[in-house]
């Protein structure tokens, strides 16, 4: 998606450790009209796939998931990054390593929110090594849900998470795929 690539080039910042900072529009400060356009693009790609729910992980994936859900007319379900007092009953869990934060956590999702009747679309802001998506896939599979695909705003293609998922037969649609990046350069996969 050319508009996202331009936004990354003009507002993004490459930080040490292959971190791309896009907090000015995607995951700290949210450019709502632009995020709705991203959501509309995702919805257009999946409108014929019978999606019943969007599944994401807190917190940066929620805004993009909500935007796509508006156009698909479905609920958003998100896994929490830790158990809390308001999560009770049977839960689905998955261990996840966060590349950005450099830590491990257990994602938690109440089992009541997703079932074998659901056809889910996994949505997230970034895809690097694929750990978060693998955790969401694990939880969706444990619930017996059908996974229609994964929609991502920005994929760091050089970190191979998306390529690994595609090799397993999982549909991955990224709105922008970064092929390489450095302090003074950023190139997109064509």
Image (cartoon, rainbow, N blue to C red):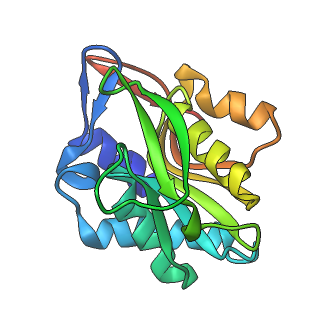
Location of residue 91 in the rendering, given as x and y in whole percent from the top left corner:
53, 54
Is residue 111 depicted above or below 99 in this figure?
Answer: below
Judge left or right: residue 136 versus residue 126.
right
Is residue 37 depicted above or below 28 in this figure?
Answer: below
Q: Can residue 159 be seen in this view?
A: yes
Judge left or right: residue 171 versus residue 66.
right
Tell me which residue sits at (61%, 66%) in the image.
114
Q: Which of 174 and 189 is in front in this view?
A: 174
Q: Is residue 1 visible?
A: no
Location of residue 61 in the rendering, given as x and y in whole percent from the top left corner:
39, 54
Location of residue 90 in the rendering, given as x and y in whole percent from the top left corner:
55, 58
Judge left or right: residue 83 versus residue 94.
left
Tell me which residue sits at (23%, 54%) in the image.
25
Tell me which residue sits at (38%, 51%) in the image.
80
Is residue 84 depicted above or below 114 in this figure?
Answer: above
Tell me which residue sits at (80%, 34%) in the image.
168
Residue 78 position by quadrant = bottom left
The single residue placed furthest to the bottom in the displayed view is 73
Q: Which of 69 and 188 is in front in this view?
A: 69
Q: Which of 179 and 159 is in front in this view?
A: 159
Count of numbered circles in the view: 0
The single residue placed furthest to the front in the displayed view is 89
Location of residue 68 in the rendering, given as x and y in whole percent from the top left corner:
49, 71
Report the quarter where the C terminus lies: top right
């Amino acid at each position: 998606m050319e508009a996202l690539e331009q936004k990354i080039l003009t507002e993004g910042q490459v930080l040490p450790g292959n971190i791309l900072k896009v907090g000015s529009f995607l995951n700290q400060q949210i450019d709502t009209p632009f995020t709705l356009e991203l959501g509309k693009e995702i919805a257009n790609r999946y409108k014929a796939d019978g999606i019943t729910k969007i599944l994401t992980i807190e917190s940066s994936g929620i805004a993009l998931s909500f935007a796509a859900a508006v156009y698909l007319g479905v609920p958003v379900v998100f896994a929490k990054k830790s158990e809390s007092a308001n999560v009770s009953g049977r839960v689905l869990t998955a261990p996840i390593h966060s590349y950005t934060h450099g830590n491990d956590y257990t994602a938690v999702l109440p089992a009541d929110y997703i079932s074998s009747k659901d056809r889910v679309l996994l949505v997230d802001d970034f895809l690097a090594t694929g750990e978060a998506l693998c955790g969401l896939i694990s939880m969706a599979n444990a619930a017996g849900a059908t996974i229609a695909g994964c929609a991502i705003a920005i994929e760091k293609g050089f970190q191979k998470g998306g390529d690994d998922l595609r090799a397993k037969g999982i549909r991955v649609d990224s709105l922008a795929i970064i092929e390489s990046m450095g302090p003074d350069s950023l190139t997109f996969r064509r």
